[in-house]
Amino acid sequence: MVLEFDPAFIQAPEHRPKPAVAEAGSIPLIDLSPLHLLEQHGGPLVEGLEVLVAQVEAACREWGFFQVINHGVPPTVVERAWAASRGFFALPPEERRRVRRDEVNPLGYYEAENTKNVRDWKEVFDFVVHERAVIPSPGDAGGGVDRLIELRNQWPQLPHGFREALVEYAQATEELAFTLLELISLTLSLPPKRLHGFFKDQTSFIRLNHYPPCPSPHLALGVGRHKDSGALTILAQDDVGGLDVRRRSDGEWVRVKPIPNSFIINVGDIVQVWSNDKYESAEHRVSVNSERERFSIPFFFNPAHYVMVKPLAELVDEKNPANYEEFNWGEFFKTRKNSNFKKLDVENIQIYHFKKAK
Ligand code: OGA
Ligand code: NI
């Protein structure tokens, strides 16, 4: 019997992965051990920190992607998060669906997400890092006065210790997120805590991704090509590999090599706008394979819903005018989420829609 591959998952020919994707020997690997110097930072940058800031600056400019080691998140914390994720996705489907996301609650389990209107070969579990954060109600159409909903996590009863492991992981990675934000501020010649205020009522969330083996990996993608819409993403991936980044120099897709005890960091759309295009959020996607399931855990570092995103005042002047109109983060996020939830006939919202005409 020949099983028909569900057409909902089939990518247009130009977006299908090639049989061999080059391995990215060249996405920068940055050792964060000089970070302890940040705590003592007051006046001019001390030497070790200066080198680190220069590395982060170059990586953000040239790739929008880098890997970090010696990042301060304890390996045991990461291990427990992996175990929680594997345990959850090993549960029977009806158990997973008990915490399924719906039109009212955008958090929990979901297995039918689309990226750019093509179904992704994956299942996910989403939870927010700070529960009382509010966002515009996902069910509402844009343009009007929004109702706000309070974000509430849906924790499954099983596997045991799931919630505790992930709350611990969230705390540790959130700390890293703020540290990276300080580094990015320094690369823009701003005071280290310049961007912290935007995250006071942050809408950050963590996603457990599970990519089951796929019978037609040449036709489908785990996640279709996209850019992350928030400020930064901190991604843990297992040893299977499959994350592909679009290289700026030639537009080729290159595979990010798994490195034990590392995180992959990528610049999101908000940093692109804040930096007025000094840094660009890089396009990426996930290829799947027919043999091994793959797991990954991205932390999407997102500001408060009420933040108006626009190029930072310090970085614009008469000679360098702002390249973007300001937009409201909550609205943007809601519109993007809605398009992942439903199939739409139109392209989903992108930051270039806010780009000013030259
Ligand atoms: C994402 C993403 C990459 C991965 O979920 O936005 O890009 O390796 N994931 O799973
Ligand atoms: Ni992504």
Image (cartoon, helix red, strand yellow):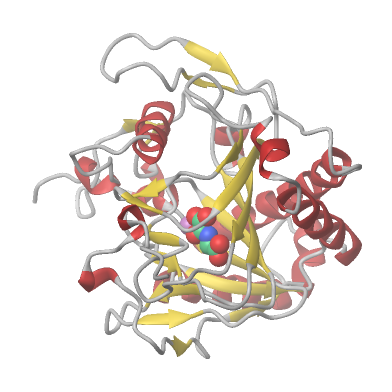
| One can see residue 267 in this view | no
Q: Position of residue 85 (x, y in %)?
A: 75, 53
From this view, report whether residue 41 is shown above or below residue 95: below
The quarter of the rendered structure image containing the N terminus is: bottom left
Q: Which residue: 80% across, 45% down? A: 166
Q: Which residue: 56% across, 23% down? A: 105
Q: Position of residue 51 (x, y in %)?
A: 63, 79
Q: Residue furthest front?
A: 1
| One can see residue 2 in this view | yes
Q: 153 or 89, which lies in front?
A: 89
Q: Position of residue 239 (x, y in %)?
A: 69, 78
Q: Is residue 66 left or right of residue 103?
A: right
From this view, report whether residue 58 is shown above or below residue 80: below
Q: Position of residue 185 (x, y in %)?
A: 55, 54
Q: Residue furthest left?
A: 358
From this view, report whether residue 285 is shown above or below residue 327: below
Q: 150 or 10, which lies in front?
A: 10
- Tell me where residue 210 sits by quadrant: bottom right
From this view, report whether residue 13 is shown above or below residue 171: below
Total residue callouts:
0
